[in-house]
Image: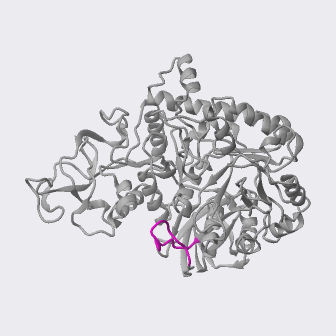
């Protein structure tokens, strides 16, 4: 395991052979001094890029040295940075290498239709994906060995390491020899993952045999449940997540809430770009860069900002003025983040473990909806999978589509037996074949899909903040029967009829005000089940009543949450614990992403909040509550295991330290 530094730069240098003067304006002192002035203490620099070119002296692969490079660029970068105590992990591309793809087309991965995976022949780009079940891996190892033997190595960042269901001749032959069916899509996917695992184990061992303390990371653009099976090849985790580059503002919070449970230090990675990688002469809005980095701290991660060095090697002073402004804030916050462990009441089982056909970056809609609801209601939660130890949690949420086999059923039953609570929605809790509920604790029997869609839920006991009337559910639910002893919390109403060509009314749907013969929500002891896909609905359409149904159910299961806070639902609140300092740290953030353009969300303005009431569950007597890093004392009151105080102002981000005996 690695203990990462807090203020990293990931410095791209993908540079065409058609550009002369590569590195000709590089000044080692200017480069390193600019980084130092911007509060940077780690920078990833390039050995080999997606074009396939090497940027340092190489005796073994002189044909791959960039044809217009006349200096030992990477070595100069490392030496200058090391003189200023700046760490320099080394970047090596893996599955995108334009030089190799052009010279060895037989090494390019093939899809099930026989087409090469990646950039078509006459389109710009180096995205042809190379197969790791070919002799290309021998070159990758040899080039890595040369780096390890000729350069100071703090760490290696291997990029574009993506499990690939490849149908190239080498993979078809290997699958056949292993008794797999290459024509079977699942067999191809499983074999592709095994190929990646073998490659990562091999290269990890290679690096660590030369540099036992070096960090090693294999980037696939997303960290999720698949990493649990390959985590031994990682010293740490870097979560690539540029909100304006396709990941969006909800990707990092979800990925980090899972990654931080894998027993590795974590780093979030955003970019200084207005859009995404390679967007030269663009500058992220300062408030956006502040939020993205400070949110990393609030969620227990270190920070990385992506940039790209100009082909001629001169560092952009304006870019590092922008980055330095943000990293000064990160540096000031670090004393309350070192060794801080996020605290959570709730584990959300991720549908990513079970689903195919995910949304971007592997995040299903129901997971995104759950994250939105829980963040907006200030609940503290982690993303979990079926292997997660649930003992530390008070509630487990199964959002919409979590199948439960016998092993998971036993685990969840034991969790409830030891005092835990479960909130399940829609198809969660069903056996993998969908034949019925595997989890008896939910107290329901499956009767099939609901006969009406949309139907209308009457909140009943889940009605706090809602009108006592039907609320439309836009997606079809399940028809379930409450078993003896199970309490019906919410009922449902029918429409006059399902909308079809023979029967329709107005533009959409019309309630008949007749009760349906199935409940909308039930409670069996410490378990609540709601029959609609509420989390998917919230992610897709955002109905406030869906959020209220979930939060009202959580109020019944978790009446004493870790945090309560006032202010608008756009405010984010997290809690970490620094055990060595005997304190808890509350992070409050208020930055509001807006859809100001068609393609992605923008943060431009900071809207301060004033006089925000906060209540935190604590263990032991509280001795002080202070605003940090201002070191300003805040009046507080403690009653039992809760401490209450008012934060006078949240100007984007505010930490509050709670010192306990």
Q: Is residue 63 left or right of residue 177?
A: right
Toward which corner of the image does residue 583 lie, by quadrant?
bottom right
In x, y percent, where is residue 370?
44, 56
Q: Is residue 316 above or below residue 502?
A: below
The furthest residue to the right: 83
Which residue is depicted at the point 71% across and 46% down? 52
Which residue is depicted at the point 63% across and 29% down? 133
Q: Is residue 473 above or below residue 614?
A: above
Toward which corner of the image does residue 562 lie, by quadrant?
bottom right
The furthest residue to the left: 502
Residue 80, visible in the rendered structure: yes
Residue 212, visible in the rendered structure: no
In x, y percent, where is residue 633?
69, 79
Magenta segment's dominant SS is: loop
Which residue is depicted at the point 59% across and 60% down? 242
Which residue is depicted at the point 62% across and 71% down? 284
Colour setting:
one colour
Span colored in magenta: 589-604
In x, y percent, where is residue 97?
67, 44
Q: Report the quarter where the N terminus lies.
A: top right
- Foreground: 337 or 142? 142
- Foreground: 257 or 550? 257
Q: Is residue 184 above or below residue 481?
A: above
Q: Is residue 657 left or right of residue 596?
A: right
Query: What is the count of numbered marks?
Result: 0
- Within the magenta stretch, is there residue 601? yes
Q: Report the quarter where the C terminus lies.
A: bottom right
In x, y percent, where is residue 122?
54, 48
Q: Is residue 256 left or right of residue 481?
A: right
């Amino acid at each position: 395991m690695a203990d990462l530094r807090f203020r990293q730069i990931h410095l791209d240098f993908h540079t065409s052979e058609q550009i002369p003067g590569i590195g000709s304006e590089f000044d080692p002192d200017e480069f390193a001094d600019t980084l130092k002035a911007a509060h940077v203490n780690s920078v990833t620099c390039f050995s080999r890029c997606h074009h396939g070119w090497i940027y340092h002296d190489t005796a073994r692969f002189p044909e791959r040295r960039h044809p217009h490079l006349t200096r030992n660029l990477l070595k100069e970068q490392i030496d200058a940075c090391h003189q200023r105590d700046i760490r320099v992990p080394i970047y090596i591309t893996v599955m995108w290498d334009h030089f190799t793809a052009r010279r060895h087309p037989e090494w390019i991965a093939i899809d099930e239709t026989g087409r090469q995976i990646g950039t078509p022949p006459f389109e710009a780009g180096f995205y042809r994906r190379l197969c790791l079940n070919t002799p290309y891996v021998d070159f990758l190892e040899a080039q890595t060995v040369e780096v390890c033997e000729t350069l100071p190595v703090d760490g290696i960042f291997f990029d574009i390491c993506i499990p690939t269901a490849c149908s190239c001749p080498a993979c078809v032959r290997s699958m056949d020899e292993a008794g797999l069916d290459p024509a079977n899509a699942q067999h191809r996917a499983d074999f592709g993952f095994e190929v990646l695992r073998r490659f990562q184990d091999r290269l990890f061992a290679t690096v660590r045999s030369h540099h036992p303390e070096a960090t090693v990371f294999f980037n696939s653009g997303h960290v999720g449940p698949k990493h649990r099976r390959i985590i031994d090849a990682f010293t740490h985790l870097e979560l690539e997540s540029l909100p304006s580059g396709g990941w969006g503002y909800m990707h990092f919070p979800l990925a980090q809430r899972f990654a931080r449970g894998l027993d590795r230090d974590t780093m979030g990675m955003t970019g200084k770009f207005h859009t995404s990688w390679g967007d030269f002469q663009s500058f992220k809005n300062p408030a956006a860069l502040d939020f993205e980095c400070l949110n990393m701290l609030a969620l227990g991660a270190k920070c990385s900002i992506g940039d790209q060095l100009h082909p001629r090697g001169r560092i952009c002073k304006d870019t590092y003025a922008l980055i330095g402004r943000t990293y000064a804030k990160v540096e000031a916050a670090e004393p309350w983040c070192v060794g801080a462990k996020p605290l959570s009441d709730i584990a959300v089982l991720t549908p990513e473990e079970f689903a195919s056909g995910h949304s971007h970056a592997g995040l299903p809609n129901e997971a995104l909806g759950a994250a939105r609801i829980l963040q907006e209601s200030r609940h503290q939660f982690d993303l979990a999978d079926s292997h997660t130890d649930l003992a530390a949690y008070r509630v487990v949420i199964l959002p919409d589509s979590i199948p439960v086999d016998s092993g998971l059923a036993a685990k969840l039953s034991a969790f409830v037996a030891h005092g835990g609570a479960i909130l399940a929605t829609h198809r969660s809790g069903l056996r993998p074949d969908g034949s019925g509920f595997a989890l008896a604790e939910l107290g329901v029997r499956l009767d099939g899909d609901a006969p009406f869609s949309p139907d209308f839920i009457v909140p009943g006991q889940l009605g706090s903040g809602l009108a006592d009337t039907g609320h439309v559910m836009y997606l079809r639910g399940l028809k379930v029967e409450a078993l003896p002893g199970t309490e019906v919390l919410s009922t449902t109403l029918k429409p006059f009829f399902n909308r079809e060509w023979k029967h329709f009314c107005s533009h959409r749907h019309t309630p008949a005000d007749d009760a349906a013969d199935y409940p909308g929500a039930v409670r069996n002891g410490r378990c609540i089940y709601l029959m609609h896909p509420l989390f998917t609905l919230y992610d897709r359409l955002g109905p406030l009543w869906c959020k209220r149904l979930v939060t009202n159910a959580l109020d019944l299961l978790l009446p004493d949450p870790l945090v309560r806070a006032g202010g608008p639902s756009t405010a984010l609140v997290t809690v970490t614990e620094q055990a060595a300092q005997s304190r808890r740290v509350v992070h409050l953030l208020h930055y509001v992403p807006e859809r100001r353009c068609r393609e992605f969300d923008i943060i431009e303005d900071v809207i301060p909040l004033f006089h925000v009431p906060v209540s935190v569950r604590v263990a032991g007597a509280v001795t002080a509550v202070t605003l940090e890093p201002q070191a300003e004392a805040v009046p507080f009151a403690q009653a039992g295991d809760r401490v209450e105080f008012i934060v006078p102002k949240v100007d984007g981000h505010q930490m509050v330290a709670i010192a306990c005996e």
